[in-house]
Amino acid sequence: CHNLIPQGVSCVGVLLESHISFHTWPEAGVITLDLFTCGSGKLVPLVPIVEKLFAIPEVGSLIKPFVHWVHKLRGFRPDDYSDVLTKDLGLMLQESFDVKKEIASVQTKFQKIDIFDLMMTYTGEPKKGSYEAQHPEFFQPHRIVYLDGVIQSTRTHLEAYHEALVHSVMITHKNPKRVAIIGGGEGATLKEVLKHNTLEKVQMIEIDEEMVITSREYLPEWSDCSDLIGSAKWCGDDERADIFYEDALAWFIDRFSEGGKYASEDHPKFDVIIMDALDPQDDISFAELLYTDQTFISSLYNALEDDGMIVFQLGSAPDHRDAPDTLNINRRRAILIEELEEVEFESFHIYEDGNCGFEYPWTFFVVMKDSLDDSAWYKNEAETQVAIHQRILRTHSGAPALKYFDGATLKGYQIPHKVFESTFCRQDPTPDGCITEETRIADIHQSDLEVKISGLGDRSGRGVFTKVDIKKGMSIGREATANPVYFSPSATRLIQHYADDYVEETSKVYDYMDGYGWQTETMGHPSYYVDSSMQTFVNHGCNGSFNIAGTLLKASQTITEQNAKESDQYSFHDNEVDWDNYNPRRLRHLHHLSSTFEVALRDIKAGEELFTDYLSFAEGDEWWTDVQDLKRWCSGEDVGHITKKEKTHWTDSNE
């Protein structure tokens, strides 16, 4: 040791390859220490001992000194070296906080649990009557949970993450009664599920019982259901909740896979399954099984009701400069999506949320067994708010049970972020629909078109004619067709309902929608688009005589209303661009793709009428009915809906 002048001391102690040193500044009330070891022992557990020995109040003072400490791994290690301190936990320990306190460190049979309280700036006890004193909940330390050194969840972002995971799928499902949770040992996912009054039973399958016990002791907020009317103090005691301390992979395979150990028994199926387990990016063998095992993924499909849904948390979102998922750390995410397509899930939705408390925005993935349920995913904000009001339990305190999720939040999830489209379209070969030549195609403006009586005859009503020559491949009114009138599935249902009840004004709206528009099921249940430009008057080209067509057709179509058979529906649409089940480009541009502009199939001379192929708008249950209607119109046996309505109106007016 070396005495300093006028006061203080500097000391160094060396033992083999380890050392301790400290320096004091008594006039400033400061001691700095440096601990270094090359041994296998951990230094972080020594922090409380150091604090007890050195953080001594001044004589006559009761104020405990601040302790600022950091921990850093030094030296060189093998490339495959792995330790909790080389991950998120180690990065946090390198930072300086006014408060950095270890709350618990537990090694279970399956994982290491570390819980810390952090506070960047601590200004001492709040003054009486101050905002801080009146609202202490906003000034608590930031409690963080680490599993094997990887950040799992945080108190500050508790609701943001778990509400983003749970309620997107729970609100989308029309009536979720039975729910399964894979993982979720902290209890926060269970807490969110229990907020739904439709729920009859939720089964949480968590392999690590010690995780649940530790969370209940040190993370009480995560699983506190005491404020929910009709629930319990601890969410696990809610009569609707069952917790199984088992391997979730084996649990589902045994019950719901072909040849499973208990597959011969009758096991009730689930409406919703929530995967809140390891991140697919985790370098852990069990994560490999969880996200790539085909038998497990098939068992999840089998465990769902016909209208069932699954939501996965899939780790950090990609960056806009990333390669495709198949070629980087997100490889398991790509494999999972392929496997989900293989077992014939019909609908896929990917979204991210940047408020979950992690370094990067977090990715969530919803899959549905029935694509008709897409219409519920695409609810508007008001519909979601109504569902929340009807379903979410009230609280004893009167505070809203949901702190983060609402109609606007779900609306933001409906369209994937651009990064998902960008990385998806970087695959080799490039997926269908990712290549577009739209901006390079010369366009015929609306001012070069005119509407007059169709050349097909008086029975065909109006038609659209070109005033200029159009070259093959040119687009027709591209700008104008980008703004159609859209009737959502819910609006369509309401209009059809009231039109069926012969409400006159609603019937007129229905005639406009159905007569001038085209029906599509891209949003699940039927919805309609009506071209807002004069191109809404373009007639059908009978027997393949159409001279313009949508840009999604791959080649000339040989099926017409004259030769079509009822079984031709799928082969007809096979001629269009082949969208993969999971295609974020399609999900980002649904409205645009549903109302895509048309191009000339041949050179069209000035004065010619434009004809399109109405069969390309026929899909779903109405396919064969539409074929028969077109055949009658083309043969002159009948006229179109609008022409028929207008002639009836003209006759009524003259009478």
Image (cartoon, helix red, strand yellow):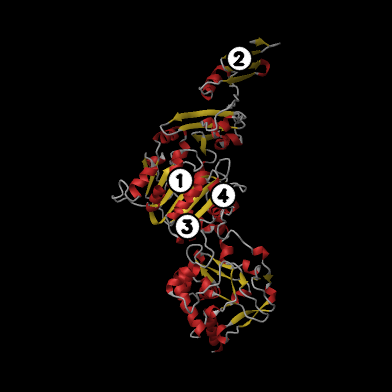
Circles 2 and 1, Cβ within 8 Å, touching? The answer is no
The answer to whether residue 399 is visible is: no
Q: Position of residue 392 (x, y in %)?
A: 45, 50
Query: How far is mark 4 from mark 2, CA to CA?
Result: 63 Å
Q: Which residue is mark 1?
A: 291
The CA span between labels 1 and 3 is 18 Å
Amino acid type of the residue tagged 2 in the rendering = Val
Q: Residues within 10 Å of mark 1 (few under 14, many from 20)?
A: many
Residue at the right extreme? 5
Please, which residue is most extreme toward the bottom here?
A: 655
Q: Earlier in the sequence, mark 3 or mark 4?
A: 4
C-alpha gap between disc 3 and disc 4: 21 Å
Label of residue 347 in the image: 3
For the question of whether residue 602 can be seen, the reply is yes
The kind of residue tagged 4 is Pro
Rendering quarter of residue 38: top right
Name the kind of residue labelled 3 in the image: Ser
The quadrant of the rendering that contains the N terminus is top right
The residue that mark 2 highlights is 59
Of tags 4 and 1, the one toward the viewer is 4
Q: Secondary structure at mark 2?
A: loop
Element under disc 1: helix
In the rendering, at what x and y percent does residue 185 appear?
43, 39
Q: Quadrant of the C terminus?
A: bottom right
Q: Earlier in the sequence, mark 4 or mark 1?
A: 1
Secondary structure at badge 3 equals: strand
Mark 3 vs mark 4: in front: 4
Rendering coords of residue 18 (x, y %): 57, 18
Per the model, the C-alpha gap separating discs 3 and 2 is 69 Å
Mark 4 or 2, which is nearer the eye? 4
Q: Report, in whole angstroms, how far the alpha carbon at label 4 lies from the one at label 1.
A: 17 Å
